[in-house]
Amino acid sequence: MSYRSRALEQSGPAGDRTEANRPLVILVDDDDGLREALHELMLSVGLDAISFGSTRDLLEAELPDRPGCLVADVRMPGVSGLDLQHRLVESGNTKPVVFITAHGDIPMSVQAMKAGAVDFLTKPVRDQTLLDAITAGIERDIKQRAHARVVQEHLSKLALLTPRERQVLREVAAGRLNKQIAFDLGISEITVKLHRGNVMRKMQLTSVGELIRVWEALPAGVRENVEP
C-alpha cells in the first residue's frame, strides 16, 4: 500500500477522495539537487508534491487547500525554516512541518518540536525515516482538518442562538440544574426549560452529554465570551 493510500484511508469515504482531499507534500529547500531528489521520492511512493527553492517563494505562492505536510530545511537564505514555522503558527496555520538539516543542534531541535514540528531529521536522512515522518504529518493534518470542520459546524449552529440561549447552554454544560440556572439568571424555571429546548433543537443535540461535548469542543475564546 502506498503512503498516499495509507493517508487517504483516514480522509473519508471513497466518494470524497477528490483531488482536494489527496495529500500534498510541500518541499522547501535551497539545494536544487536535494529538492529534486525529494520530489522524485514523493512521486515514487504515490504522493503528490510541490517544491520551492526558498521560504519567500512559498510564502508568496497560492497553495491549494489540501491536507498534507511541509518538509523544510532549517537553514536557508532569508527566512529560515524555523522562522517559517513561527510565521505559520502566528497566522493560525497548523500545517505539520518536518525539518531536515545538515547543521542542526539540540536547542534548535527542541525549539522546533516545542513549536509543533513532527520531526527534526539530520542529513543525510534515510528515505524510510523521512517517509515515516511525512506519513505521520499527513495523518496529523487530516485529523486537524476534520476537527476544524466539526468546530466550524458547531460555531455555525451556535450563531443561531440568542444571547440568553447561549447563557443557558453554558450553564447546562457546567452541570447546573434548571432551578439553579433560573435563580442565577433571574428568570423562571419554565423559561429556562424553553431556552434549553431551543438550544437542543437549534444545535441539533439529543442529550446533555452531547451538549457538554459540543460546548467543550468550542474554542476557549468563544466560551469565555458568553456573557454570565
Image: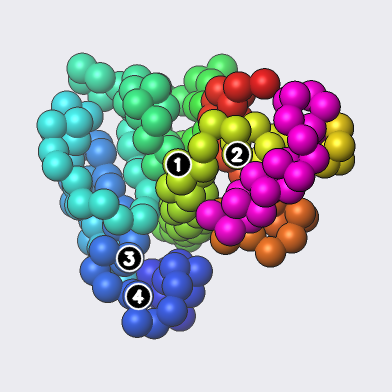
Residue 187 falls within the magenta-colored stretch:
yes
Residue appearing at x 35%, y 26% in the figure: 91
In the structure shown, which secondary structural element does the residue marked by tag 3 occupy? Answer: helix
Residue 175 in the image: x percent, y percent? 84, 40
Residue 134 in the image: x percent, y percent? 44, 53
Figure quadrant of the C terminus: top right
In the structure shown, which secondary structural element does the residue marked by tag 4 occupy? Answer: helix
Badge 2 crowding class, 10 Å Cα cut-off, few under 14, some 14 to 19, many 20 or more, is many
Q: Nearer the viewer, mark 4 or mark 1?
A: 1
Q: Nearer the viewer, mark 3 or mark 4?
A: 4
Q: Report the front residue among 11 and 197.
A: 197
Residue tagged 2: 165
Tag 3: residue type? Asn
Q: Which residues are magenta?
A: 181-202
Q: Earlier in the sequence, mark 3 or mark 4?
A: 4
Residue appearing at x 33%, y 33% in the figure: 73
